[in-house]
Image: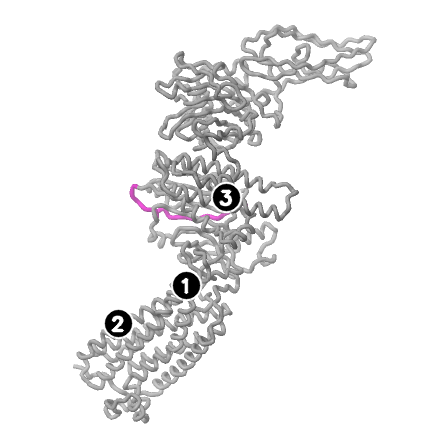
């Protein structure tokens, strides 16, 4: 439907020189039954000796017609041409023959002009305006009158009342025939088929609709016959609480809808605009709410339009002259434009009405408020358990919040900078409180339930979150964080709320697939049966293949995650998926993490944040074999490229030692921090890293990012140890190392001690010496990250070797008593004692880039890493203690019959029981301290562990060395008298020991 070109201006004077007086362009009016008589006009120049001057004075005539009221400006002699200024010349004059018009003029075509943007009245902008629908339109049925009503939008005349349709049978509807008879041919063709609208088409109507959620029928506001089947025309209708718009050209169909924006029994404005290039847009109360750019194709051949051309208001026409889908409520002020009305002229749809006047404060007091603080206060008394109330409240607050944020950003220059900052901070605090309160008051099930179409309205919560998470609020969030506000808890609560509402919605005829785009957040809400989702092996987010207009303003990002659909649960229950992509959240997100603890100096999030949540829960076993793949771009490098640099080294910026793949954990507890939650690397490994992006593999879903660590990451650093702890620990290490060296030397230098049991103790002591030396060195090298990593590896490996040799000694004693096997397994034991810990530590080091970065050089920054040491040692200690107790209970029934051998094994078993008990004493506080089970008393537990651990060598030598009869007499033979006095025992004498092959004590062949 196209506005015709303005008529060409024909000059009526040749050889003009100066302008005497300008004339006025003539606009003609439209009448229903025009008649015209016209004389042919000619222009002939003649010459007279005296120059003459003709001046045309403009006059204004307003003619009320039955079709369109147009304010016109005409000449005193009605003419069909626009005359340039008649000028004075010396000789030639101009004679113009007049075209005469009867009092009821025919339709003359107004020139196409650009409306004055400041004048948005229908009379100044529209191509067609029907102010009085009841008198203009004809009832579609004789028994279905549509009376006028004084209940109309403020500032307008009477509305058309379709109250007859509130009760069956529904029959009230209006038709406006012959839309093209009083227009030019191009407009007539445009009305018949939008395909002929070269400049597009727009239409609007005021509506006060009465509806309920249970009404699933279509209720048409207006239609020219357009349908989803491809019949050309336009249509706007309501279904439930959703508004739908449609344009069909016979070859393609544009259709879009929006949910919950019109309030029940309240005046509002609904409009559509369309063009081939920009597609279909749906406006509510002067605001664009939905848009579709590309059509759905119609199978050939193209459908013809319905005949004759007819506009229906309050219903739609079907084939065969039948009418259906009657509306309920009131309609007024139908208006049409023979071009696409751009968004900046959306006020045209309201016909000069102020948007604030559309609201009805007595009926909707909260929804009429435009002050965000007032809305926050009103939320305290609002009951948002009803679905419609929750939807309309969220949508209204989203609009007010967006407008308020824009107003804060556009404050006048005269405002003091400090005052401006104070206002911005207060506004941000208010928005955060509003979002939290909305989430809290709508977290429960909504009544009477959520339909799939309701999600679009509820998810407008994202618009408020988008304003809260804008990158320009980074400094403000730092101030709020110092006051106890945590942006991560806000983001996590909105994530959980979104997926829970999506899962709460009832299954409809169609799957839910919503793409929500705001300034700083892009989300996708998907709800579908498992069978439909699993038709493809993977889901990708963001999906850059469709609806990607937002990529340009976001800097054409390449971040994406891939999730295997096999991980989704099966069965009949629909699967709800909520994924979100944040533009600026990485600038605001907290940096506390499992690598460096609460001291996150130099640590920052170097990628945008992606999240992916599923209800019901996913199958973690599937993700273990087919993990989530996440590709994340380095934001610091991208910013450098935008500056024209090629590397972060070329500009002054943060130093990065490594980038770690992390997920957000809501349960991470960090010492000395009151806040719970942080970035953790458990389950995520780095697959590939380039200067511009990193690819991660994760065995779970959640919120993903890259964490950039500085060259010297420092975790939670404890204050220096108390003097008594330092002295006790140092003294213990010294005594332990000296005793262990002496013990190792004694076994090595005495061939009589080269039996299987003493060789096990020798290897145990060697591992213990290395462990003690590593712990002792930590106090001097723990601030050097690379040295700390080496010491972490030594402690991890050697302490596990200690545990393995304790377990091996327990096994050897068990075999000696139960089976009588006392030799021949030394080589196997050597492979197990040194090989198993090597493989265990090797796998952990290879799979954990952050290995060793811990302030005490205790394996790593995370609990899982520290557990790889503490947990096995604790279990070995408990197991050795229990096993040695079992052996002690069987001492009366040994397989070996040689008394001195039985006595030796008996003493060794009892001493092993005591040594295992000491290991338990070391690792009970060690487990609590290093796994941070008691954060309030963490320092005390660590002090207890350090002191008990420092004397490990003394425990080994005292119980396993001196507790052995064989060792005492073999090493201290000449001091036996002194030993007998010390241990007050005369049972065992050197003469009782049996030596063979010179000096070696022989255990073998003494059992039956």
Write down the residue under mark 1.
935
Q: Position of residue 38 (x, y in %)?
A: 63, 6
Identify the residue at horizontal 74%, vertical 17% (top origin): 85
Task: Please indicate whether residue 970 sits to the left or right of residue 935 in the image.
Answer: left
Whether the magenta-drawn stretch holds residue 557 is answered as yes
Residue 169 visible to an observer of this rendering: yes
Per the image, label 1 sits on a secondary structure element best described as loop
Per the image, label 3 sits on a secondary structure element best described as helix
Q: Position of residue 680 (x, y in %)?
A: 43, 57
Q: Identify the magenta region.
A: 555-572
Q: Earlier in the sequence, mark 3 or mark 2?
A: 3
Instruction: Residue 466: give its label.
Output: 3
Write down the residue under mark 2.
882
Q: State which mark lies toward you, 3 or 1.
A: 1
Label 2 to label 1: alpha-carbon separation:
30 Å
Identify the residue at horizontal 39%, vertical 74% (top origin): 949
Q: In which image quadrant can residue 575 be found?
A: top left
Which of these two is toward me, 224 or 854?
854
Which of these two is toward me, 129 or 982?
982
| Looking at the image, residue 523 lies above or below residue 108 | below
């Amino acid at each position: 439907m196209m506005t015709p070109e303005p008529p060409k201006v024909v000059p009526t004077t040749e050889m003009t020189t100066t302008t005497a007086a300008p004339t006025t362009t003539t606009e003609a009016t439209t009448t229903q039954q025009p008649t015209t008589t016209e004389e042919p006009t000619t222009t002939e120049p003649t010459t007279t000796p005296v120059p003459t001057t003709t001046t045309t004075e403009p006059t204004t005539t307003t003619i009320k017609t039955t079709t369109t009221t147009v304010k016109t400006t005409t000449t005193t002699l009605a003419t069909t041409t626009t005359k340039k200024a008649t000028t004075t010349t010396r000789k030639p004059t101009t004679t113009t023959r007049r075209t005469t018009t009867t009092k009821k003029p025919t339709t003359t075509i107004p020139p196409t002009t650009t409306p004055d943007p400041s004048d948005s009245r229908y009379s100044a902008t529209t191509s067609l305006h029907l102010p009085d629908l009841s008198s203009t339109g004809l009832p579609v049925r004789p028994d279905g009158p549509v009376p006028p009503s004084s209940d109309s939008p403020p500032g307008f005349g009477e509305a058309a009342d379709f109250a007859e349709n509130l009760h069956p049978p529904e029959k009230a509807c209006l038709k406006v025939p012959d839309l093209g008879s009083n227009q030019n041919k191009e407009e007539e063709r445009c009305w018949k088929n939008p395909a002929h609208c070269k400049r597009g088409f727009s239409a609007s109507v005021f509506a006060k609709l009465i509806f309920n959620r249970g009404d699933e029928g279509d209720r048409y506001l207006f239609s020219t016959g357009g349908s989803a089947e491809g019949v050309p025309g336009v249509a706007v209708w309501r279904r439930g609480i959703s508004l739908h718009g449609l344009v069909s050209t016979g070859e393609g169909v544009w259709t879009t809808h929006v949910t919950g924006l019109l309030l029940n029994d309240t005046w509002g404005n609904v409009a559509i605009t369309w063009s081939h290039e920009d597609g279909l847009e749906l406006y509510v109360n002067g605001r664009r709410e939905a848009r579709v750019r590309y059509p759905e194709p119609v199978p050939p051949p193209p459908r013809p339009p319905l005949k004759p051309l007819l506009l229906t208001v309050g219903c739609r026409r079907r084939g065969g002259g039948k009418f259906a889908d009657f509306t309920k409520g009131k309609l007024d002020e139908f208006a049409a434009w023979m071009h696409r009305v751009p968004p900046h002229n959306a006020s045209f749809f309201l016909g000069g009405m102020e948007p604030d006047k559309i609201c009805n404060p007595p009926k909707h007091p909260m929804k009429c408020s435009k002050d965000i603080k007032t809305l926050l206060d009103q939320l305290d008394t609002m009951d948002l358990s009803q679905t419609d109330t929750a939807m309309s409240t969220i949508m209204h607050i989203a609009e007010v919040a967006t407008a308020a944020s824009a107003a804060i950003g556009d404050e006048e220059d005269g405002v003091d900078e400090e005052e401006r900052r104070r206002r911005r901070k207060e506004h941000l605090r208010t928005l955060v409180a509003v979002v939290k309160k909305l989430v809290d008051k709508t977290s429960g099930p909504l009544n009477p339930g959520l339909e799939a179409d309701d999600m679009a309205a509820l998810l407008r919560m994202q618009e408020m979150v988008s304003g809260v998470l804008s990158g320009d609020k980074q400094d403000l969030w730092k101030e709020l964080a110092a006051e106890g506000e945590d942006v991560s808890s806000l983001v996590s609560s909105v994530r959980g709320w979104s997926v829970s509402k999506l899962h709460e919605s009832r299954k409809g005829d169609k799957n839910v697939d919503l793409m929500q785009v705001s300034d700083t957040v892009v989300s996708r809400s998907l709800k579908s049966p498992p069978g439909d989702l699993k038709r493809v092996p993977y889901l990708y987010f963001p999906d850059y293949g469709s609806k990607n207009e937002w990529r340009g303003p976001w800097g054409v990002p390449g971040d994406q995650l891939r999730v295997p659909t096999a991980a989704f649960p099966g069965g009949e229950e629909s699967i709800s998926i909520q994924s979100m992509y944040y533009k600026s959240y990485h600038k605001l997100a907290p940096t506390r993490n499992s690598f460096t603890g609460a001291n996150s100096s130099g640590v920052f999030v170097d990628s945008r944040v992606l999240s992916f949540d599923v209800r019901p829960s996913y199958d973690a076993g599937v993700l273990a074999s087919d993990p989530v793949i996440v590709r994340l771009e380095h934001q610091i490098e991208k910013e450098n490229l935008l500056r024209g640099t090629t590397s972060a080294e070329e500009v002054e910026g943060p130093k990065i030692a490594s980038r770690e793949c992390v997920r957000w954990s809501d349960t991470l507890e960090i010492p000395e921090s009151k806040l719970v939650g942080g970035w953790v690397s458990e389950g995520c490994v780095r697959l590939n890293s380039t200067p511009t992006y990193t690819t991660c593999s994760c065995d779970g879903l959640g919120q993903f990012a890259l964490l950039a660590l500085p060259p010297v990451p420092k975790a939670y650093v404890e204050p220096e140890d108390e003097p008594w702890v330092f002295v006790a620990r140092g003294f213990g290490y010294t005594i332990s190392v000296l005793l262990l060296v002496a013990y190792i030397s004694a076994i090595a230098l005495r061939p009589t001690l080269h039996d299987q049991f003493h060789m096990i103790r020798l290897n145990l002591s060697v591992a213990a010496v290395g462990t003690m030396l590593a712990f002792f060195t930590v106090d001097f090298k723990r601030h050097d990250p690379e040295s700390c990593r080496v010491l972490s590896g030594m402690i991890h490996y050697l302490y596990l070797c200690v545990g393995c040799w304790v377990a091996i000694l327990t096994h050897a004693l068990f075999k000696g008593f139960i089976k009588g096997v006392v030799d021949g397994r030394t080589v196997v034991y050597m492979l197990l004692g040194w090989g198993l810990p090597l493989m265990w530590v090797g796998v952990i080091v290879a799979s954990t880039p952050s290995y060793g970065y811990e302030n005490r050089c205790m394996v790593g920054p995370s609990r899982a890493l520290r557990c790889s040491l503490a947990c096995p040692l604790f279990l070995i200690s408990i197991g050795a203690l229990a096993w040695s107790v079992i052996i002690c209970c069987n001492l009366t029934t040994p397989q070996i019959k040689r008394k001195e051998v039985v006595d030796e094994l008996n003493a060794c078993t009892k001493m092993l029981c005591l040594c295992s008990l000491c290991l338990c004493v070391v690792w009970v506080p060690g487990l609590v301290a290093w796994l941070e089970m008691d954060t309030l008393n963490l320092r005390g537990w660590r002090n207890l562990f350090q002191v008990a651990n420092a004397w490990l060598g003394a425990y080994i030598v005292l119980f396993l060395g001196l507790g052995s009869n064989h060792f005492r007499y073999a090493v201290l033979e000449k001091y036996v008298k002194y030993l007998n006095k010390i241990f007050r025992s005369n049972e065992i004498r050197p003469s009782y020991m049996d030596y063979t092959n010179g000096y070696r004590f022989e255990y073998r062949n003494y059992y039956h």
